[in-house]
Amino acid sequence: MKANAQQLRDERKKSDHESLEEGSALLLDFFKLAAIQASAESGLVPAVVQNAETGEVLILAYVNEEALNQSLEKKIAVFYSTSRKELWIKGSTSGDYLDLVEIRINCEQNSLLFLVRPRAGGVCHTKDESGATRKACYYRKLQSSDLSLVASGPLPWHDSSK
């Protein structure tokens, strides 16, 4: 298993962003959390970001104490960018702000759920085949070891009338 995980890590490093973000090969980064915690100046917790109206999971982000406080104060989603190592106000460059409806905390108080209302088009930094920003970062599904595109929007079992 370790050799397999190491091979995946090496392959992932060799791949470019286009292959990673648009390809059909599975290149999961099993070491992301360890790298994040090792480089973080302060503690981080994962935050699942969900569309409050459709129930669609939009993105998984990370939050430090300052990002959480700013989210509560500004009523918009503020995260900690693990790649840039700074606060990230979602939408500050794209205009795709996420208005904060509610923040929930899990039973062990080690992760958050941000319920949001997207103001504009998309959430993901990648584009779909028409060139539009994707509405969510979860645009591929895993079948065996291959990835395939899925439609964005409410999940098939979601009933908004409830």
Image: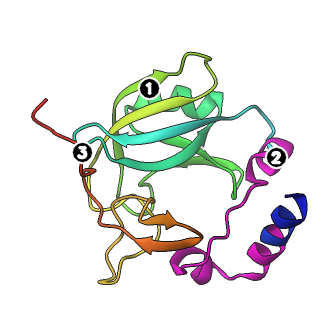
Using the image, tell me which numbered label, if any, was put on residue 157.
Answer: 3
Q: Tell me which label, 2 or 3, sits earlier in the chain.
A: 2
Q: Which residue is mark 2?
A: 34
Q: Residue furthest right?
A: 3
Q: Is residue 31 magenta?
A: yes
CA–CA distance in space, label 2 to label 3: 34 Å
Going by the numbered disc 1, the residue's amino acid type is: Glu
Number of numbered tags placed on the structure image: 3
Picture residue at 58% right of the left edge, 82% below the top: 18
Q: Characterize the magenta stretch by its predominant secondary structure.
A: helix
Q: Quadrant of residue 140?
A: bottom left
Local SS, label 1: helix
Q: Are marks 3 and 1 in contact (CB under 8 Å)?
A: no
Picture residue at 44% right of the left edge, 55% below the top: 92
For discs 2 and 1, the disc positioned in front in the rendered view: 2
Q: Is residue 147 above or below residue 37?
A: below
How packed mark 2 is, by other alpha carbons closer than 10 Å (few <14, some 14-19, many 20 or more), is: few
How packed mark 1 is, by other alpha carbons closer than 10 Å (few <14, some 14-19, many 20 or more), is: few
Q: Nearer the viewer, residue 38 or 88?
A: 38
Going by the numbered disc 2, the residue's amino acid type is: Ala
Q: Quadrant of residue 109?
A: top right
Which stretch appears magenta?
Answer: 9-38
Q: Which residue is mark 1?
A: 73
| 38 relative position to 143: left or right | right
Return the x and y of residue 129 as percentages of the image width and height: 34, 83
